[in-house]
Image: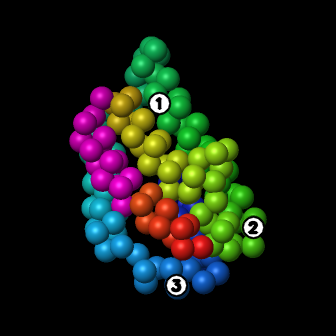
């Protein structure tokens, strides 16, 4: 749910995207890259995120999954659009810069579900960089 839309995006980047990338804050970019590696590795290494018998705690996983479904809806909407910078940094159901915010919050809730502080911290690092960069680009538009 996370990787496939991003792979498709590489061939469907917004118009004039290159003009904005050169202005990215290097500190936020470092946070984003470190966060991407940490979140990916932690999600694969730990088994805390596997299905467990249903309990009230399971709602964290359900909400995380719903956010990822919304993330997929965001991508469908983007791929059907004219693929402008405005389209790419749009909100969805009031969630600002949905393409960055939804997966970060979903992974944070997955960390809560798995009671995994390492994923939680990794997600915060990712969020600072990823959401920060997207907000800066949106502000430039």
Figure quadrant of residue 118: top left
Task: Report which residue position mark 2 lands on.
Answer: 81
Front in this rendered view, residue 22 or 104? 22
Q: In the rendering, at what x and y percent does residue 128 appear?
A: 36, 55
Q: Earlier in the sequence, mark 1 or mark 3?
A: 3
Observer-side mark, 1 or 3, equals: 3
Q: Are marks 1 and 2 in contact (CB under 8 Å)?
A: no
Q: Residue 71: image x %, image y %?
A: 59, 50
The residue positioned farthest toward the front in the image shown:
139
Distance, label 1 to label 2, CA atoms, is: 30 Å
Q: CA distance from mark 1 to mark 3?
A: 36 Å
Specify the segment rendered in magenta: 115-129
Q: Earlier in the sequence, mark 1 or mark 2?
A: 1
Q: CA distance from mark 3 to mark 2?
A: 19 Å
Mark 1 touching mark 3, by CB under 8 A?
Answer: no
**Circle 2 — which element?**
loop
Give the residue displayed 27% in from the left and 44% down from the top: 121
Whether 108 is among the magenta residues is: no
Q: Which mark is residue 61?
A: 1
Residue 109 at x, y = what percent?
Answer: 42, 35
Is residue 74 found left or right of 32 in the rendered image? right
The residue labelled by disc 3 is 18
Which residue does the image show at 42% across and 19% down from the upper left?
A: 57
Q: Secondary structure at mark 1?
A: helix
Other-residue count near label 2 (Cα within 10 Å), few / some / many at <14 / 14–19 / ≥20: few
Q: Nearer the viewer, residue 65 or 139?
A: 139
The image shows residue 15, relative to residue 123, as above or below, that is below
Whether the residues at callouts 3 and 2 have beta carbons within 8 Å, the answer is: no
Q: Nearer the viewer, residue 98 or 44?
A: 98
Q: Which label sits on residue 85?
A: none
């Amino acid at each position: 749910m996370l990787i496939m839309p991003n792979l498709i995006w590489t061939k469907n980047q917004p118009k004039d995207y290159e003009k904005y990338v050169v202005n990215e804050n290097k500190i936020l970019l470092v946070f984003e890259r470190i966060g991407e590696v940490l979140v990916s590795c932690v999600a694969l290494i730990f088994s805390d995120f596997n299905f467990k018998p249903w309990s009230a705690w399971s709602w964290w996983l359900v909400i995380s999954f719903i956010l990822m479904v919304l993330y997929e809806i965001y991508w469908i909407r983007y791929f059907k659009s004219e693929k402008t910078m405005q389209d790419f940094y749009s909100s969805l159901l009031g969630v600002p810069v949905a393409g960055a915010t939804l997966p970060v919050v979903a992974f944070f809730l997955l960390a809560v579900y798995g009671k995994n502080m390492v994923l939680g911290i990794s997600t915060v690092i990712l969020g600072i960089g990823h959401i920060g960069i997207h907000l800066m680009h949106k502000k430039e538009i």
